[in-house]
Image (cartoon, rainbow, N blue to C red):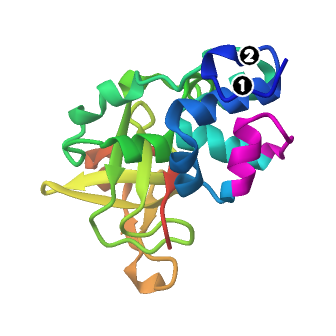
């Protein structure tokens, strides 16, 4: 096909055509601002004049809200599902997710299926309590599986209407240790089995993201 800038003429049977379609749907200038690609790279991709790496395709998919699997293989849904976001208000720490946050967190059906979760059982929280784990900090956003309330891992707890996030380590005798700061061992909390049973556990963190 001829190299045209008309979005209606793009061949969606090719990877280059699907990438160009995603770029033109949002606009090249928008994609340039939301990704690490240069203006020249975005322009060439939008006009199908070059190929690119999987990493760049993933950046474009995330920025535009298209599914990476659809761009790369032409399979599955074209757009990231909004299903998850229809349920996040049930978690009171999230009052409203704007479009930019949706793009940053792009959870599609494939992601949920891989994690063996449904949108209904997930909650999103932008951490506003003190935490300094190795990989998770205050201000990060986390995806919580509310069906997982037992076991070891990073969990969100509720105590006296305060949300706490930390690493829960279950001992063989049923007691546990709750770690909220990897750099300060003296902040670890030891919990008896009885105390653990009384805890209000919101769920296990299955994804996190943010700037350190």
Q: Is residue 197 above or below residue 88?
A: below
Could you say which quadrant of the image residue 8 lies in?
A: top right
Q: What x and y, as percent, mark residue 110?
A: 63, 24
Q: How far apart are the alpha carbons under marks 2 and 1?
A: 5 Å
Expressed as whole percent of the image width and height from the top left, the position of residue 45 reads: 75, 41
Asked whether 78 or 124 is in front, the reply is 78
Q: Is residue 189 visible?
A: yes
Q: Is residue 76 left or right of residue 178?
A: right
Q: Is 35 positioned to the left or the right of 18 in the image?
A: left
Q: Which of the marked residues, 2 or 1, is nearer the chain's N terminus?
A: 2
Instruction: Locate residue 49 relative to residue 189 in the image: left or right.
Output: right
Few, some or many C-alpha atoms within 10 Å of disc 1 (few <14, some 14-19, many ≥20)? many
Circle 1 residue: 18
Residue 53 part of the magenta-drawn span: yes
Give the extent of the magenta segment. Answer: 40-54
Residue 6, magenta (yes or no): no
Q: Secondary structure at mark 2?
A: loop
Per the rendering, the mark at residue 12 is 2
């Amino acid at each position: 096909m001829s190299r045209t800038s008309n979005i209606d003429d793009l061949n969606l049977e090719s990877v280059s055509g699907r990438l160009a379609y995603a770029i033109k749907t949002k606009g090249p200038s928008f994609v340039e601002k939301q990704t690490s690609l240069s203006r020249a790279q975005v322009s060439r991709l939008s006009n199908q004049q070059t190929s690119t790496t999987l990493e760049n395709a993933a950046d474009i998919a995330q920025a535009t809200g298209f599914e990476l699997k659809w761009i790369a293989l032409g399979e599955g849904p074209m757009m990231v599902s909004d299903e998850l976001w229809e349920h996040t208000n049930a978690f009171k720490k999230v009052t409203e997710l704007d479009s930019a946050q949706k793009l940053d967190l792009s959870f599609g059906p494939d992601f949920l299926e891989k994690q063996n979760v449904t949108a209904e059982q997930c909650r999103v929280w932008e951490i506003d309590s003190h935490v300094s784990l190795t990989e998770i900090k205050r201000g990060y956003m986390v995806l919580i599986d509310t069906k997982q309330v037992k076991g070891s891992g990073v969990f969100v707890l509720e105590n006296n209407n305060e949300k706490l996030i930390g690493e829960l380590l279950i001992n063989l005798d049923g007691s546990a240790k709750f770690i909220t700061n990897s750099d300060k061992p003296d902040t670890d909390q030891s919990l008896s089995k009885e105390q653990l049973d009384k805890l209000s556990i919101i769920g296990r963190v299955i994804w996190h993201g943010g700037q350190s």
